[in-house]
Image: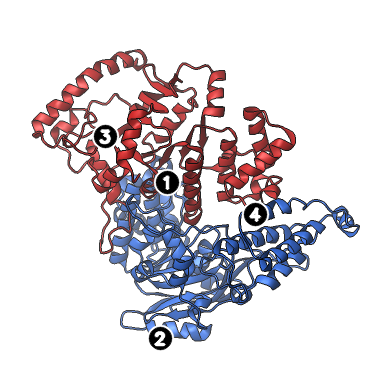
Amino acid sequence: MSSQAGMTAERERDEPILSVDNLRTVFHTKRGTIRAVDDVSFDVMPGETVGIVGESGSGKSVTARSIMGLIESPGEVLEGSSITFQGRELTDLSDEEYRQVRGSGIGMIFQDPQTSLNPVFTVGNQIKEALRVNQDLTGEAATQEAIDLLEAVSIPDASRRLKEYPHEFSGGMRQRAVIAMMLACDPELLICDEPTTALDVTIQAQIIDLLKDLQEERGLSLLFITHDMGVIAQIADRVNVMYAGEIVEKAGVEPLFANPKHPYTQGLLGAIPGQHVDQDRLETIEGEVATPMEPATSCRFAPRCPKAFEDCDHVHPALVDPTEGAEADHQAACLLYPSEMSEDEAVEYHRSLRSDGREDAEALDGGDAE
Amino acid sequence: MSELVDQTVGVDAGPGQEVLVEVQNLKKHYGGEGFFAAPPVKAVDGVSFDIRKGETLGLVGESGCGKSTLGRLLVQIEAATDGTISFDGTDITTLTGDELTEWRPNAQIVFQDPESSLNDRMTVGSIIREPLDVHGWKTAPDRRERVMDLLQEVGLQEEHYYRYPHQFSGGQRQRIGIARALALEPDFVVLDEPVSALDASVQARILNLLEDLQDEFDLTYLFIAHDLSVVRHICDRVAVMYLGKIMELGETEELYTNPANPYTYSLLSAIPEPDPTADRQRITLSGTPPSPRDPPKGCQFTTRCPAKIRPDGFPTVSNETWEALERFREAVRERSRHGFTGRERLRRRIGMFSKFDDVDEAVSDLFDDLDAPASVTEPVEEAAALVKEGYPGDARELLSEEFDSICDEERPELQVVGDGDRLSYCHRHSGGYAPVDEVIESRS
């Protein structure tokens, strides 16, 4: 993250390893269609860490599951969504083909390591199974590789640990074991969905250090999902802030924290306690996250936004550069920007940007709305 | 210990610093009764501190350190094994039956998980009214009115009286829990991780509410949390717990800016700061907390301490080697808890025991890349040989004899450091050892 310039240069050279474009994931329920992820686009470059932050209900986990092909009925990834991994379109893959990608291309770590481990097999068994399926290793070779993997994730006394069951591991160690299992698949991209949320701070620090080391050693790309702004600041190179199914701001990690543009991001940062020593009251964001049921025709944050004005209820903001010549790819979806324009100009600008997109969106919705 | 406690009282007793709760040498052990029982889990292992009237005392620590147990002891939903809790002059650990019931309205608790601490089959009104009913507070219409008032106090509406908990969001449910705790007008409220399950924006609103209520009703809080930034915002003083002991206690801002204890030091440095440019030296603690059934004989934190006092006689041993040694000792300690079967004992007797042969792997993983001197490698190899023969307990003792320092052997005392009312539990504060921050600096 220190080499912002170096990274941009690199990005021009490389193709993104993962490219999500216009992703829409919906859940069909009795009470209507919930648009959990609504037109989300972002790229992950080789070797970089992209963060997604948001509160519960913002759609960040559904985004991860959509990429992994884990959305099942009543959920659906809508037509027109595109997820390309290493140049290959994932949304049209059959189940069998997807399994291949999950095995060796994309790995995923969940919040609760307990759910990723089978309680009736030893940890060694489970790692060796991953090795057998993905790398055709069996017997002594697999055991040795499993020990090496556990050592790679800094589990002490690895050979004994291999023979133990998940319940004999502490929470942090379980998460390490899951990471070791993922490494057995030798993935290019690791999706981490709140991997440290259930852990204590000292253990969280260990896991973050571990992920950074592994990234360096193995050239992994990480997609890191969390609600914790502190964790994001530590690990991410670039950040996407999600609210109610949409990305409302995207930026490099430093500009985002130094100079947040979207009122929601500002609110999130202001609500972190313990930052301002003499502060009596915390800043708060009023109201609750709304569940997006309709295609957006307005800013979804407007009802809670302290800076909202009338047009916010009528115009759906697009992601725009907040100021001319700002840091590369800092974008915010808010009618207050671009700040060079007057309010009316900006509103008009957003309207024009959206009107092209709107027709596509409505064409897509025609099918499933009724 | 009692002398030290007197000291704190002496320092504290300024104007408006009246003590509400005085805890002395409080212990809570689980299990361990009977001759064949495994050793007890010492969840709270002899803590002493005061809570002053009107303050918010924070209690932080990692999971399993005993902070929730301590909170539950203070409101007497758990009975203490030993020690006293003096509440406004009454020792509440001795209360029973009617006396206890009579005392209970004074101290209430708000639980962490608003999903599981409210009965989904009761209306919000009856949940909040329940403590009033139980204690026979005034007449039924008065109670109803009181609940309506409470709903407003915590930022809910009167019409919520007839709704069910599942109709509310996490933040609102926590407000219901707070209203229930306040129903009997307590002086003292234990807040057990009240905002941990909530999103950042909701969390901020609940914290603001708690502060407002404290001002309005002159409440005294014990605020239990694992999130150190929340504690920094809301607490006047903070106690840091590790494995059943209070490691450090002091005024919040002073403790955060200038921690005295190595554990506080590491805990604070592990908080991920929401500032990507922060170029702070981070101490990542290795290892996991030891089993509370088998805690170290000396300082509870000795197995992970970044400022551990090292034994004399090893002047050339590097930091990495000490670290590897500590991890090896952890591995041996864990093996020594292995319960041997009869068959294994037999094999061990005839020298055919092979279950632990893989300990060599651990030794080579830890020590191969290090250029450790013979004074370290020889005892390590000897210990590894003992483990392989099936005597990890002996190996543990051998390592203990070779490498134990004062930190492994003796419990430190909670002692006054600096000129304020800061207390810290560490050997480095006495006996002419180098100060904690210098040591941590030089070792990292």
Circle 2 marks a residue in which chain?
B
Q: Which mark is residue B368?
A: 4
Q: Measure the C-alpha gap from mark 4 to mark 1.
A: 64 Å
- Going by the numbered disc 1, the residue's amino acid type is Thr
Sequence-wise first label, 2 or 1: 2
Chain A rendering hue: red
Q: Measure the C-alpha gap from mark 2 to mark 1.
A: 48 Å
Place of residue B273 in the rendered image (x, y in percent of width and height, measured from the top left) = 36, 54
Q: Which quarter of the image is occupied by the C terminus of chain A?
A: top left
Q: Measure the C-alpha gap from mark 2 to mark 4.
A: 54 Å
Q: Which residue is mark 3?
A: A329
Chain B rendering hue: blue
Q: Which residue is mark 2?
A: B10
Image-quadrant location for residue B58: bottom left
SS for callout 3: loop
- Foreground disc of the pair 4, 3: 4
Place of residue B90 in the rendered image (x, y in percent of width and height, measured from the top left) = 48, 79
SS for callout 2: helix
Place of residue B374 in the rendered image (x, y in percent of width and height, measured from the top left) = 68, 66
